[in-house]
Image (tube, rainbow, N blue to C red):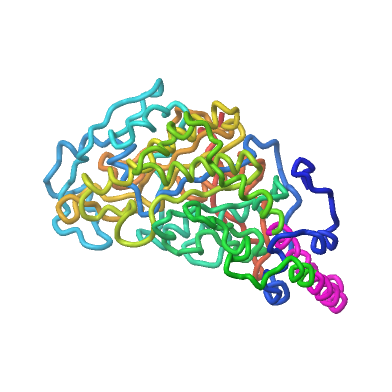
Amino acid sequence: MNPENGIRKLSRRSFLHATGGAFGSLALSHLLLRGEEAGGLDSVRHHRPRAKQVIQLFMNGGVSPVDTFDFKPRLQREHGRRFNPGEGQKVESVTSSPGFKVLKSPFEFSRHGQCGRWVSRVFPHMAGIVDELAFIVSMTSSTNVHGLGSYMQNTGFTQPGFPCMGAWINYALGNISDNLPSFVVLPDPKGLPYNNLGNFTSGFLPTKHQGTVIKAESDHPIQYLFPPKESSQITPEGEVAGRRLLQQLNRKHQAQRSGDDRLEARIESYELAARLQLSAPEVFDLSHEPESIRKNYGMKHETTMDFARRCILARRMVERGVRFVQVWSGPGGPKNNWDNHADIPVELPYMADQVDQPIAALIQDLKVRGMLEETLVIWTTEFGRMPFSQQQAGRDHNGGTFVTWMAGGGVRGGTLVGQSDEWGWKAVNPFWCYDLHATVLHLLGIDHERLTVRNNGIDRRLTDVHGKVIRELLA
């Protein structure tokens, strides 16, 4: 426990007896009925790490690469003609794309930075930091379906039930801070992404490694952390009695199940809940952030305010020892996300305007604070979009190629790996989620082939039986 918090070090059982707040009001049934296996590895590392923490920025819905970071002049030349990639290749669409007419990008592209990276005008702020970014321009997915694609990018599998990357990292490295969760998720306030909580799951790993979902826009970002104001029946005396009863139940439970460490895992989660009562209010209080920071992130503008708040919170969390923070842009569903089927000229800028300034400010802020060297930032999405039109000015789903970039944490900025074809339809030399995950783990000091858990008779890992570290991106 961190002595800076002004709390003397207590044993678990003493902590349960002594800690104030709403700890005793938590439902006792959860403690006894939740049977997750305690476990995890004690800071396993296979080589010297370059990064200590991760911030993942997930653009939900499928960002169009040819309208953002993957400039394709041929689309300009062939605009309006029937899409024909040649060599008898079959062209299919996911939902409805009558005519398969080539659709040029409505946004001007230009080169930026010393690296000369092409960026469209929808990202003017990110264009200014391209020398900090390492691009993978030929990411590939085996699916064109949102839910499956989101699972694949987060867990390495297209079906549910597998741990996400944040859970694997939490399992392997453990927590940095005693007073905050190790894996935090900041969803879009408009709603959860496709798969809902499935994207943050611990799967077959102990439940304590799943993402802690925090509603940054709410007056109560962490649900049930404090008793509701209307719960007048919860008194200090009642809480003491509740803790005493809980302690008795714990002892009885352990006496009947000698050697079962599941209870210990649940006790740890309740201790964390108690400590959060002390630390969480300070983390979520942005009033002490300098005016310059709030301005740089875009807190002063309605369009960027929400994503700016969550980016600042992400920085504050890694600053205070959170291992993995995931920030989402866009909910699941047919609108208000990156799923631009109908009108790219309108729908894409609507989303890009919300995230562009906050993301650029986050990178710059981490760098100024000296945190970028040990904080890995990832920008990604579940798949890309087609080079031909849908509904006149929209684009359909395309798992054939899309863009991901990384920054900080041992990544060589200003680099680019991969290539898509001249249409932006398929990857010429594809990289998969397995390669991305292998690279992230490598930067954290973990060999992706050695981080395994036996489940149903199989040694499971985040990268399944695939994956290679993308060494061209490493500094």
Q: Position of residue 53 (x, y in %)?
A: 61, 41
Along the line of sight, which residue is nearer the eye, 362 or 166?
Answer: 362
- Residue lying at 81% horizontally and 60% vertically, measured from the top left: 18
Instruction: Give the residue displayed 27% in from the left and 39% down from the top.
Output: 422
Q: Residue at x 60, y 32 (%)?
A: 371
**Number of on-image labels:** 0
Q: Is residue 417 visible?
A: no
Residue lying at 74% horizontally and 54% vertically, measured from the top left: 41
Chain part drawn in magenta: 244-273
Of 216 and 99, nearer the camera is: 216
User: Residue 243 occupies which quadrant of the picture?
Assistant: bottom right
Examine the residues drawn in magenta and state their main secondary structure.
helix
Q: Is residue 171 left or right of residue 105?
A: right
Q: Is residue 125 above or below residue 225?
A: above
461 sits to left or right of 70: right
Which residue lies most toward the left here? 80
For the C terminus, which image quadrant? top right
Residue 142, can we see it?
Answer: yes
Please state the horizontal and vertical placement of residue 362, each as a whole percent of the image. Answer: 49, 35
Toward which corner of the image does residue 103 lie, by quadrant?
Answer: top left
Most extreme residue toward the top, as rendered?
A: 114
In percent of width and height, residue 284 lies at: 56, 47
Residue 23 image-quadrant placement: bottom right
| Magenta-span inclusion, residue 392 | no
Find residue 369 and report its horizontal and vertical position in percent. Answer: 58, 28
Left or right: residue 451 compared with residue 286: right
Is 263 part of what is drawn in magenta? Answer: yes
Q: Is residue 140 left or right of residue 122?
A: right
